[in-house]
Image (cartoon, helix red, strand yellow):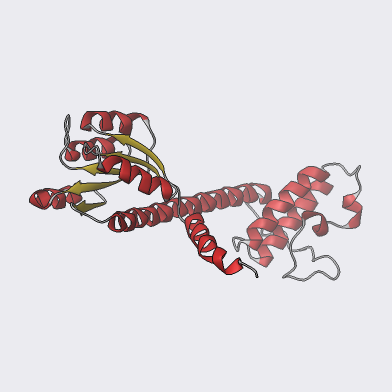
Amino acid sequence: MSRLPDTLPVLSIMAELEKRPSLKTLIVDDDKRLLPVLKSLLTTEGHVVTTAMDGLEAIEVCKGTPLDLVICDLMLPGASGIEVLKACRHSQPSTLVVLITGFASLETAVQAIREGAYDYITKPFKMEEMKIVVRNAGEQIRLIRENKRLLKELQDAYEQIRIVKMIMGADRGGDKDLMVMPSGASRNDPLIAGSLLPDSYMEDGFPGKHMLLSDLERIASLREKGFLTDEEFELCKSKLLKNLKT
């Protein structure tokens, strides 16, 4: 009898963990019983965890170690959780800070939120509550990373467009003799640089072939991403081939 159904929960958990970012996390708490429990919890969730039991030690870690998340008790020897928060925000502004607080200091925790803390959790808390807080922080960090990635792609695309404009020159008005797509090719077909050239350009000894292919790949990629219209793409291609002939 197959035991495949027994593996489904494990596979589901693994798939869920793969979706979440692994966070470089600092846990700061002087409770010798709670600290290892929290470390074990976050390590199991797939995060890389560093610990500290003193506020001053935590501040030094924040200065020298890149961190995604800091989970910090509000009441600490050496320096308070608020001081750790301020130091962390100063050295690593993008790091999220979660404060652990007792009910008696809840007002202070709310004030810390106004000063830049991402969230707080009150003692006593269940481990599941801490998981939720960390997962929410992880989703926030994932969105920040995704936005940075998309911004980088956009910046790269604009740089490619700038290069294309240099290829085209300032005046494109006279380039009316546009090149046509290869015979049998569709506008929806994947664009391969070599397929954009007449057969005579594909000979191994053709001068400038590799540079031309690189430029054609650039404009084909821009067209695929929607940064160039079909007309602009054909103008660029026509200009490239003209420049090569001359």
Q: Can residue 198 be seen in this view?
A: yes
Quadrant housing residue 226: bottom right
Q: Is residue 57 left or right of residue 181?
A: left
Q: In this view, does 212 lie to the left or right of 141?
A: right
Farthest residue, direction left: 104
Q: In this view, does 80 lie to the left or right of 164?
A: left
Q: In this view, does 160 lie above or below 67?
A: below
Quadrant housing residue 33: top left
Q: How many marks?
A: 0
Q: In this view, does 109 lie above or below 178?
A: above
Residue 234 location (% of width, % of height): 72, 62
Q: In this view, does 146 lie above or below 26?
A: below
Q: Which residue is drawn at 22% across and 52% down?
A: 120
Q: Is residue 4 above or below residue 136?
A: below
Farthest residue, direction front: 1
Q: Quadrant of the N terminus?
A: bottom right
Residue 130 location (% of width, % of height): 29, 54
